[in-house]
């Protein structure tokens, strides 16, 4: 059991995907000592953007009022990691808030392959001599 904003948290299904736990300095020190994992800490200022690699667990501490703008981007280079994350989400319980496949990686892959096949056919037909 954990206490979250003065509420008792009965169950933690997935410590990352639940998004209910915040690592304080003590937790981060313990991560370093036990697993040799050392998080990056930095401050973001007005006008700055932060790019977080796919699959990289992260937490945000807002020190002032702010608006978060996020853009999920899938490139061919990170498709494998996105697919792995999709499989992680699939294993979560049915009513878990992270269960929904927001990126729809498999649909994007199918669309990209379909588009590539159409383009290849178009190029091949352009190469064929006309009779």
Image (cartoon, rainbow, N blue to C red):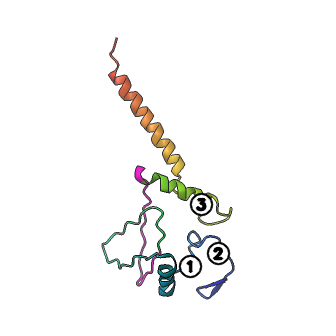
- Residue 96: image quadrant is bottom right
Are discs 1 and 2 less than 8 Å apart at CB? yes
User: Per the image, is 72 magenta?
Assistant: yes
| Sooner in the amino-acid sequence: mark 3 or mark 2 | 2
**Crowd rating for badge 2 (residues with CA inside 10 Å; few <14, some 14–19, many 20+):** some
Mark 3 to mark 1 CA distance (whole Å): 18 Å
Comes first in the chain, label 1 or label 2: 2
User: In the drawing, what numbered circle is on residue 89?
Assistant: 3
Q: Is residue 18 above or below residue 99?
A: below
Helix, strand or loop at label 3? It is: helix
Give above or below for 109 relative to 70. Answer: above
Q: Specify the quadrant of the image occupied by residue 39.
A: bottom left
The label shown at residue 12 is 2
* Residue at the (38%, 23%) spot, across then down: 125
**Label 2: element kind:** loop
Residue 55's tag is none
Q: Which image quarter holds the C terminus?
A: top left
Q: Earlier in the sequence, mark 3 or mark 1?
A: 1
Q: Secondary structure at mark 1?
A: loop
Residue 124 visible in rendering:
yes
Residue appearing at x 64%, y 85% in the figure: 7
The residue located at (43%, 77%) in the rendering is 38
Where are the magenta residues, as a range? Answer: 59-77
Q: Residue at x 51, y 42 (%)?
A: 110
Q: Which residue is mark 1?
A: 21
Check contact, mark 3 vs mark 2: CB within 8 A.
no
């Amino acid at each position: 059991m954990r206490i979250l904003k003065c509420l008792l948290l009965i169950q933690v299904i997935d410590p990352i995907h639940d998004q209910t736990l915040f690592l304080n300095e003590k937790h981060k020190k313990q991560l370093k000592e036990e697993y040799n994992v050392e998080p990056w800490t930095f401050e973001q200022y007005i006008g700055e953007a932060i790019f977080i690699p796919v699959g990289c667990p992260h937490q945000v501490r807002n020190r002032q009022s702010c608006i978060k703008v996020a853009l999920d981007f899938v490139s061919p280079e990170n498709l494998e990691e996105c697919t792995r994350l999709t499989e992680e989400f699939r294993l979560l319980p049915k009513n878990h808030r992270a269960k929904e496949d927001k990126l729809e990686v498999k649909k994007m892959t199918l669309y990209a392959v379909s588009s590539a096949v159409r383009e290849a056919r178009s190029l091949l037909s352009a190469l064929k001599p006309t009779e």
